[in-house]
Image: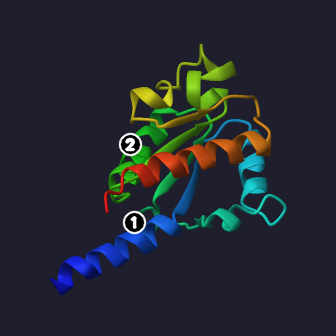
Amino acid sequence: MFRRIGDKIVCYARRKSPWILHFDTGGCNGCAIETFAVLTPRYDIERFGGLSKANPRHSDILIISGAVTKKIESRLRRVYEQTPEPKAVIAVGSCAISKGVFHDAYNISGPLDRIMPVDVYVPGCPPKPEAILQGLLKALDVWRERYKI
């Protein structure tokens, strides 16, 4: 019985403090700069409980920006597999969503949703930090719904 109560407490604590990993796959880095702006005190994602982490094994939400190249595809899949369940994935920018300006490039493997399941799309080239913050809040809702207490 104590194990069950302990599991509920840990689950409740994780629901209130998701950890975020930003993975930039390349491109012009416009989306990366805007995503870093969301993680700074001006937009303050920490007021919603989010915290930026650098290790995929400790993160709950993946923010992926940039065009997915053929060289980075296997690394991106490994990062996705290392992230524990439940997890949410956000595709930021038109390069991650639909290859953007790189749609005819020979080294681009495809949009992000062909490589892994994507929960939230944030369109734009680059999207505004407010749009990324709104997408992150939507991903928080999706991620919290996956917890069943």
Residue 57 shows in the view: yes
Element under label 2?
A: helix
Label 1 is placed on what type of residue? Arg
Which three-letter amino acid code belongs to the residue tagged 2?
Ser
Q: Name the residue under label 2.
A: 74
Q: Nearer the viewer, residue 88 or 1?
A: 1
- Horizontal side of 36 relative to 104 (left or right) equals right
Q: Place residue 127 in its image quadrant.
A: top right
Could you say which is closer to the camera, residue 134 or residue 123?
Answer: 134
Q: Position of residue 54 (x, y in %)?
A: 54, 66
Tag of residue 14: none
The N terminus, quarter of image: bottom left
Q: Residue 147: x, y in percent?
A: 35, 57
**Percent position (x, y) of residue 74?**
38, 42
Q: Which mark is residue 57?
A: 1
Along the horizontal axis of the image, is 3 left or right of 44? left
Q: Earlier in the sequence, mark 1 or mark 2?
A: 1
Query: What residue appears at the point 75 percent right and 29 percent down from the top-left corner?
Result: 125
**Quarter occupied by the C terminus:** bottom left
Please identify the residue farthest to the top as the structure is shown.
104
For residue 111, side relative to residue 42 (left or right): left
